[in-house]
């Protein structure tokens, strides 16, 4: 794999991996919880005619690790926004945790995100729709590279209310100017994703055809 491009999100160094060159709009891949960028373009995304990039989130892959945690989905949305600042307009494909981040950045940056695909993967459910019993870490976790154990702990408890998720879906659909702003290809449907899938401007397509509306 070609050496990644180094981006900055505040004090974090982010690794943005070029997977394939090509003309036109970029495809940006966002991985699941505890994962890292793939080394090659996944088969079901090979139809994309343009350049393909993959981002390692904070605390994952070749990106740096913050001291003492402090992870939540909006921090990772800022990671994705840093990638968009480098790439310009892009279509985003997220799996698991990356699907939730793809939804957030599609709603927050409808000028830059030309469609987003929400797919199955690790961290799709998060911590559910409502806060649960608080947890206490009695001793500091041992951090030895990535994935950061604080990321695994904190992002697996990330609360995802359906009404919060649909706010971003509506912003993406209303402000992007696209007939289809979001595609749901995930089979697993936690409450936030089931609510998003029911929104106008959102299509449900199998993984093999998930890019059809954006080609």
Image (cartoon, grey):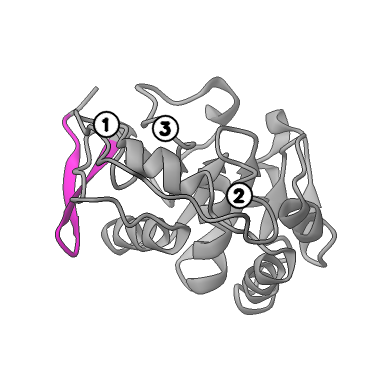
Residue behind mark 2: 127
The quadrant the N terminus occupies is top left
Asked which secondary structure carries label 2, the reply is: loop
Q: Residue at x 24, y 41 (%)?
A: 140
Q: Residue at x 28, y 32 (%)?
A: 61
Does 83 lie within the magenta span?
no
Residue 166 is left or right of residue 43, and the answer is: right
Q: Residue at x 57, y 47 (%)?
A: 99
- Sequence-first tag of 1 and 3: 3
Q: CA distance from mark 2 to mark 3?
A: 15 Å
Instruction: Name the foreground residue: 69 vs 178.
Output: 69
- Sequence-first tag of 2 and 3: 3
Residue 85 is left or right of residue 5, and the answer is: right
Q: Residue 146 has which mark?
A: 1
Label 1: how many residues lie within 10 Å, few (<14), some (14-19) or many (20+)? some
Label pair 1/2, CB-CB below 8 angstroms: no
Q: CA distance from mark 1 to mark 2?
A: 21 Å
The answer to whether residue 93 shows anywhere in this view is no
148 vs 181: above or below: above
63 vs 89: above or below: above
Q: Residue at x 66, y 70 (%)?
A: 164
Label 3: how many residues lie within 10 Å, few (<14), some (14-19) or many (20+)? many
Instruction: Name the foreground residue: 42 vs 50.
Output: 42
Give percent across and percent down for residue 130.
Answer: 68, 61
In the rendered structure, which segment of residues is drawn in magenta?
3-17
Residue behind mark 3: 34
Does 10 lie within the magenta span?
yes
Give percent across and percent down for residue 141.
Answer: 27, 37
- Sequence-first tag of 1 and 2: 2
């Amino acid at each position: 794999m070609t050496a990644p491009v180094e981006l900055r999100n505040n004090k974090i160094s982010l690794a943005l991996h070029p997977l394939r060159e090509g003309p036109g709009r970029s495809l940006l891949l966002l991985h699941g919880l505890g994962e890292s960028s793939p080394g090659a373009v996944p088969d079901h995304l090979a139809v994309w005619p343009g350049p393909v990039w993959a981002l390692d989130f904070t605390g994952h892959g070749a990106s740096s690790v913050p001291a003492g945690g402090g992870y939540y989905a909006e921090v990772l949305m800022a990671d994705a926004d840093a990638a968009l600042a480098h790439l310009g307009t892009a279509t985003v494909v997220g799996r698991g945790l990356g699907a939730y981040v793809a939804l957030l950045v599609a709603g927050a940056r409808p000028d830059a995100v030309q469609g987003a695909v929400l797919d199955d993967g690790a961290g799709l459910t998060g911590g559910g729709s409502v806060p649960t019993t608080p947890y206490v870490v009695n001793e500091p976790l041992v951090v030895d590279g990535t994935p950061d154990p604080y990321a695994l702990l904190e992002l697996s408890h990330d609360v995802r209310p359906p009404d919060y998720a649909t706010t971003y879906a509506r912003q993406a659909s209303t402000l992007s100017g696209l007939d289809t702003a979001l595609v749901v290809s995930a089979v697993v449907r936690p409450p936030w994703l089931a609510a998003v899938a029911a929104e106008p401007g959102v299509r449900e397509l199998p993984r093999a055809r998930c890019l059809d509306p954006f080609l």
